[in-house]
Image (cartoon, rainbow, N blue to C red):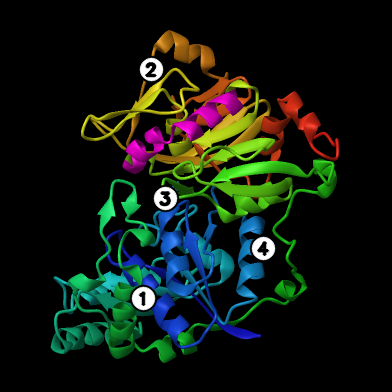
Amino acid sequence: MTKAHFLISAPSSNSGKTTLTLGILRALRLKGLAVQPFKCGPDYIDPLHHEAACGRQSVNLDTFMASQDHVQQVYQRLAKSAAVSVTEGVMGLFDGAVKMEGSSASIAELLGLPVILVVDARSMAYSAAPLLYGYNNFYKGIKVAGVIFNFVNTPSHYSFLEDACKDVGVEALGYLPKTPAFAIPSRHLGLQLPEERDFDKGLDLLAEQICQTIDLDRLLEITSLKLSDESDALDATCIHTTKDADLNSPVNLRIAVARDAAFSFTYQQNIEALSRLGTIYWFSPLTDDRLPEVDFLYLPGGYPELYAKELSENRSMTQSVFDYCDGGGVVWAECGGMMYLGQSLVDQGGGLFPMSRVFNFSTSMERAKLSLGYRKLVMEDMQIRGHEFHYSNLIEDMEEASNAMLDLQVFTARDREVSTSLYQHKNTYASYLHLYWGENDDFLKYLISRSSSTQVARNSKTITTG
């Protein structure tokens, strides 16, 4: 079946590719087309906007955290059910973990996706020609199918840009003017979340503008591809690369996952891996009174610092979480989830808010400093990949904190060792690391197998570390 598939990228960050992606997703949805969004790299926030724009769960494609086979399988499975698949790139087109490894260009090459380049033209006219020539000819493994210009002042300005495209053989598909109504405010970890503003109204205005100045029909025409024959054989289980036998299936654990405005940074493939271990119970640390009765608790990252007062004032929930952790319940908490398990959280204004008191450290947003990058966690003969992205820092009693640290090593993508730690209190594990277990769930099995509480699973099955 022939369908449209393309990847939207740019020469650099802040060129407007997210805004353009969201507008195209909404415009195609308003045309009545089923649109499947994807996001290159480890970003959590852009996929939330994608889903709000087109009504479909967006999925990350990342060849540092997962194998190429896994990424291909995830893409092919989800693209099958859509008329158009739109992938948003990360950073500049060729920016990867090491040179172009894991870059948007590498994803485009792996999946055979035509690239639509977004160029910031606010201070540019015919000088776009050598820029486009370079991107079109630098690497023969990808195809730049077309270009859309952003921040274009007038139709006459666009005519100079069209001339540049004609002279280098890259098709001009249109432009967006600079319009404040299209802008999405950002903060320290990225864009504001969709529920924080009148997102739908802005997207509808953006989609209307796109239909006026960008040739969507031509975009779909030049990016129409035939899915590989192999994809026709894929079914809903194709992304589950771990053999059922390794899980002693069926396991049937009760799994609590935090999900609200404070905790929303999850990968869809991680959630699917959890769902294969049992039943997921969503809960809100902000508004619920207590934890559901479960065998495993997952506290993902998010923005607890923005809701520190509300989280702190929900004393029944922080006590319930403390009781579960102190009673030996199995927990994985990452970044924002780890902050929630500390003694307190200090916001940017210096306000101190008591948290769940599971660990002896506290976290602070004062003197914020960015920690960012891919990470490789090596422990217990396992290597687990993920990334680190936070501005907060730990306030800790070094002697007490060191007693809670596990013996492990953490490396960057370039194999430089970093000091990021993983903390343990009984069967509660926490770290600033965001880990990806959507392809290989050995880490999940490691966590759950540490606790005898696994024996309470209703079918009395046990989980081995393989």
Amino acid on which disc 2 is placed: Glu
Q: Which residue is the site of mark 4?
A: 73
Amino acid on which disc 4 is placed: Gln
Q: Does residue 3 appear anywhere in the picture?
A: yes
Dots 1 and 3: beta carbons under 8 Å? Answer: no
Tell me the distance, in whole angstroms, between the alpha carbons under discs 1 and 2: 45 Å
Tell me the distance, in whole angstroms, between the alpha carbons under discs 1 and 3: 24 Å
Q: Where's the C terminus, which quadrant?
A: top right
Q: Where's the N terminus, which quadrant?
A: bottom right
Mark found first going from the N terminus, 1 or 4: 1
What segment carries the magenta color? 306-325
Tell me the distance, in whole angstroms, between the alpha carbons under discs 4 and 3: 31 Å
Measured as percent of width and height from the top left, residue 198 is found at: 30, 68
Tell me the distance, in whole angstroms, between the alpha carbons under discs 2 and 4: 43 Å
Q: Nearer the viewer, mark 3 or mark 2?
A: 3
Q: Nearer the viewer, mark 4 or mark 3?
A: 3
Q: Nearer the viewer, mark 2 or mark 4?
A: 2
Q: Secondary structure at mark 3?
A: loop
- Say few, some or many: other residues with alpha carbon within 10 Å of mark 4 (under 14 / 14 to 19 / 20 or more): many
- Say few, some or many: other residues with alpha carbon within 10 Å of mark 3 (under 14 / 14 to 19 / 20 or more): some
Q: Which mark is residue 396?
A: 2
Mark found first going from the N terminus, 2 or 4: 4
Dots 1 and 2: beta carbons under 8 Å? Answer: no
Q: Which mark is residue 261?
A: 3
Amino acid on which disc 1 is placed: Gly
Measured as percent of width and height from the top left, residue 378 is found at: 59, 29
